[in-house]
Image (tube, rainbow, N blue to C red):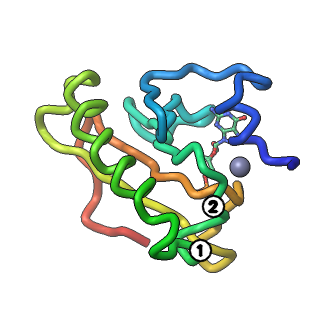
Amino acid sequence: MDCIFCKIISGEIPSSKVYEDGDVCAFRDLNPQMPTHILVVPKLHIESAADITPDNSRCVAAVFEAVPVIAAAEGLRNGFRIITNCGPDACQSVRHLHFHLLGGGQMSESMK
Ligand code: 5GP
Ligand code: ZN
């Protein structure tokens, strides 16, 4: 499968990994939009949030269990934001479900 995040997860493409367990991989975004910008990704290839089902949602729980661990390791004591873009209206560019973990500074109230 020609999926850049599957290749990062397998190690075929290099990345700056900050966390890994059996279900989840997290690595620094190539184009950071905040001082901390990490992509938290289920190892299972799911195309987007529109494809989460009762059969695969366990890996989403695993992602959100990893988030506080990663946030603490990154020192995000003052808070953080999690975003997932789904489909063209939201400008999803990589079609492997991922959660942007943003922090390290004040963000705006706008989310669009
Ligand atoms: P999306 O636009 O799909 O929500 O987010 C995709 C993110 O993946 C973007 O923020 C982009 O900078 C990041 N990205 C794309 N290709 C790579 C890559 O090869 N390595 C890493 N670390 N990040 C990538
Ligand atoms: Zn993939």
Judge by depth and name the residue closer to the eye, 112 or 28.
28
28 and 2: which one is in front?
2
Q: Which mark is residue 46?
A: 2
Q: Residue at x 53, y 52 (%)?
A: 98
- Badge 1 amino acid: Asp
- Indicate the secondary structure of the residue bearing disc 1: helix
Circle 2 sits in a helix, a strand or a loop, which is it?
A: loop
Separation of marks 2 and 1 at Cα, in angstroms: 6 Å
Mark 1 burial class by Cα count in 10 Å: few <14, some 14-19, many 20+: few
The disc at residue 111 is none
Residue extending farthest front:
55
Q: Is residue 37 left or right of residue 72?
A: right
For the point 44% across and 22% down, which residue is it? 18
Question: Dot 1 corresponds to which residue?
Answer: 51
Q: Earlier in the sequence, mark 2 or mark 1?
A: 2
> How many numbered markers are drawn?
2
Q: Describe residue 25's horizontal placement relative to residue 105 as left or right.
A: right
Q: Residues within 10 Å of mark 2 (few under 14, many from 20)?
A: some
Ligand 1 lies in quarter: top right
Q: Are marks 2 and 1 in contact (CB under 8 Å)?
A: yes
Give the percent coordinates (x, y) of residue 73: 25, 22
> Where residue 6 appears, x then y in whole percent?
71, 41
Question: Does 68 sit left or right of 45 as displayed?
Answer: left
- On screen, 98 above or below 68? below
- For the view shown, which residue lies furthest in the right direction? 2
Q: Position of residue 9 (x, y in %)?
A: 65, 32
Residue 111, above or below 11: below
